[in-house]
Structure formats: structure tokens, C-alpha cells
Amino acid sequence: MLSEIKNPRQVTSEPHRRWFTDEYFDLIVWEDPIGSIVAFQLCYDKGPHEKALTWGELSGFEHRGIDDGENRVQHHKMTPILIPDGEFEREPILNRFLQESGQIDNTIRNFVIRKLNQY
């Protein structure tokens, strides 16, 4: 079940960040000063096959895989990066999000559900 991380790190040059997590999802939401959602990133299938669906009010949607930087033989772990990936399988992700997001802020939950349905 998704729960909010209290006091996540804020980046000075970015809008206010809220972060929700569980064993399958990470949902990061960026809000403007009045609390409107300006962007979100839904990371799912955490582990070696993790992917991310990102939406921004100016940039729209982007679906990527996440290279976690772990698979570097004889090198230090690298910073995770977004890489090209296949299609977003909306129905299974949406259904799981519906199950796992029941305890988060309803405004955020409904916004993400609406955007997942639009993609």
C-alpha cells in the first residue's frame, strides 16, 4: 500500500515534491505554490526491470525504463538513468495502482488515475 514519505528532499530549482512509495511503486508528485500538480513520475516494477511513466504539464507523457546503475562489472554503481523502453501496459499498472493507492491523498490519487486513463 502506497504511503507518503514525510519531508522528502526538495530541490531548490524544482516545484515542491511529494513522494509516495511501496514495494512495487514510487510516485513522485511536483506541486506549484498553490498545491496544483504540475508533474508526476510513476515508477513501477521496482528492481532490475523498473520503468517510469512521467507526465508534465508542459512536456506531456514519456515512458522509459530505468537503468539502476548496478550492472557494471568491475565498476562502481552509477546513478540511475532513464533509458528508452517498450510500450506502457496501462491496464495492469492502472489496476495495481487502484489497489495500492487507496490511502494516499485523494486529489493526487484521482489526478494520477485520470492521467493513466488518458495515456
Image (spheres, rainbow, N blue to C red):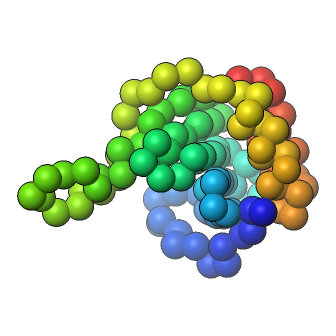
- Could you say where residue 85 lies in the image, as x and y percent from the top left? 44, 27
Counting the numbered discs, the total is 0
- Could you say where residue 5 lies in the image, as x and y percent from the top left? 66, 73
Q: Quadrant of residue 35?
A: bottom right
Residue furthest to the left in view is 74
Q: Against 18, is 36 above or below?
A: above
User: Is 56 or 68 nearer to us in this picture?
Assistant: 68
Is 49 left, or right, of 54 in this rendering?
left
Is 116 left, or right, of 58 in this rendering?
right
Viewport quadrant of the C terminus: top right
Q: Against 89, is 21 above or below?
A: below
- Could you say where residue 111 lies in the image, as x and y percent from the top left? 82, 42
- Could you say where residue 89 lies in the image, as x and y percent from the top left? 65, 26
For image coordinates 58% across by 73% down, the residue present is 8
For image coordinates 58% across by 38% down, the residue present is 54
Confirm whether residue 112 shows in the render. Answer: yes
Viewport quadrant of the N terminus: bottom right
Confirm whether residue 34 shows in the render. Answer: no
For image coordinates 23% across by 61% down, the residue present is 77
Q: Against 17, is 95 above or below?
A: above
User: Is 30 or 117 nearer to us in this picture?
Assistant: 117
Q: Quadrant of residue 32?
A: bottom right
Q: Quadrant of residue 21?
A: bottom right
User: Is 92 or 59 nearer to us in this picture?
Assistant: 92
For image coordinates 85% across by 50% down, the residue present is 99
Is 63 left, or right, of 92 in this rendering?
left
